[in-house]
Image (tube, rainbow, N blue to C red):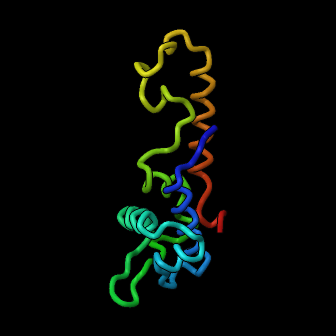
Amino acid sequence: MVRLSKKVEYGLIAIRHIAASGGMDVVTAKEISEVYRIPYDLLAKVLQKMARAGLLLAHHGTKGGYTLGKRPNDIPVALIIHAIEGTTPMIAQCMVDGAESCGVFTVCTIKSPLTKVQANIERAFNSMTLSEIV
């Protein structure tokens, strides 16, 4: 089963929270951490990654925090995942580590169907936007 990492889960929760607040209101990492009981240090790193990717704007200072860097319709879920993890979650180990990681790769009868499933997962993440999960 495809499983999103905790970092991606926390990132989706955080960016959804920011978008639900209107996207223009400055929201702090502390606020999100407290509301959803997410470890602050990990959340802060995830928010920084999303800011580096342009998904969020970081506002510094005493009234600092985060706002959306783009409109929710312009943020595919895949972009959020890629900003945090660098790639889409893979469903088979050989897709992650390559053919040499699998002892049965050359005779495997499921790699072709799993490749199609993986493509469908990626298509779903690319077509769903933040606006659909707010």
Residue located 44% across and 77% down the image: 66
129 lies above or below 30: above
102 lies above or below 10: above
Q: Quadrant of residue 118?
A: top right
Residue 4 vs residue 67: left or right? right
Residue located 45% across and 45% down the image: 87
The answer to whether residue 50 shows anywhere in this view is no
| x then y, percent, for residue 123 | 59, 44
Q: Nearer the viewer, residue 48 or 41?
A: 41
Q: Which quadrant, please, contains the N terminus? A: top right
| x then y, percent, for residue 133 | 65, 64
| Furthest residue in direction bottom, as rendered | 62
2 lies above or below 15: above
| x then y, percent, for residue 33 | 52, 73
Residue located 42% across and 25% down the image: 98
Residue located 43% across and 67% down the image: 47
| x then y, percent, for residue 126 | 56, 50
Labels in figure, total: 0
The answer to whether residue 17 shows anywhere in this view is yes
| Furthest residue in direction top, as rendered | 107
Q: Which quadrant, please, contains the C terminus? A: bottom right
